[in-house]
Image (cartoon, helix red, strand yellow):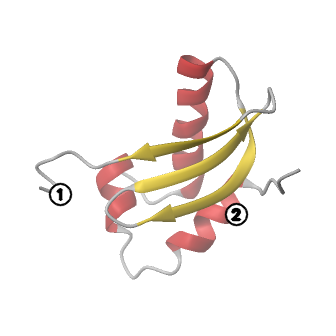
Amino acid sequence: MKIVHDPVEILQKDIQTWGTPFVELDCFGTDSAERIVGLINEFCQSYLGSKLRGYLFYGSSVGSTHGVQREDGRNLVIKVRPPPETNP
């Protein structure tokens, strides 16, 4: 069984490693871990039919990668890329 982490804590920890979290700002319009987790949770609920249980991992580079576990027990990876004009 995979260890599930608090989503806000895992995002905040990663965001704090950057001087300016450009990827998060470009992808989500915010660097607030709470708001980003809220957007990912809304996506999971609206499009995948289940809320988040927690995060398995998070990383950012040219995009934002979210390893999540849903409340229905499924694990999945959600990748978010900034608009093409931001990162051609």
Q: Amino acid at mark 1?
A: Asn
Q: Which label sits on residue 46?
A: none
Answer left or right for 45 relative to 82.
right
State the residue at coordinates (61%, 34%). 41
Q: Position of residue 18 (x, y in %)?
A: 43, 79
Choose between 74 and 50: the one closer to the eye: 74
Choose between 76 and 27: the one closer to the eye: 76
Answer left or right for 11 relative to 83.
right
Q: Amino acid at mark 2?
A: Glu
Label 2 sits on residue? 9
State the residue at coordinates (56%, 18%). 46
Answer left or right for 76 relative to 60.
right
Q: Nearer the viewer, mark 2 or mark 1?
A: 1
Quarter of the image where one finds residue 58: bottom right
Number of residues whose C-alpha sits closer than 10 Å to that of mark 1, classed few (under 14), some (14–19) or many (20 or more): few
* Tag count: 2
Which residue extends farthest front?
Answer: 1
Label 1 sits on residue? 87
Secondary structure of the residue carrying tag 1 is loop
The disc, 2 or 1, on the residue closer to the chain's N-terminal end is 2
State the residue at coordinates (81%, 32%). 73
Quarter of the image where one finds residue 20: bottom left
Choose between 88 and 35: the one closer to the eye: 88
State the residue at coordinates (60%, 67%). 12
Q: Image height check: is 16 above or below 47?
A: below
Task: Name the image quarter holding the C terminus.
Answer: bottom left
Q: CA distance from mark 2 to mark 1?
A: 27 Å
Secondary structure of the residue carrying tag 2 is helix
Q: Position of residue 6 (x, y in %)?
A: 76, 55
Choose between 4 and 46: the one closer to the eye: 4
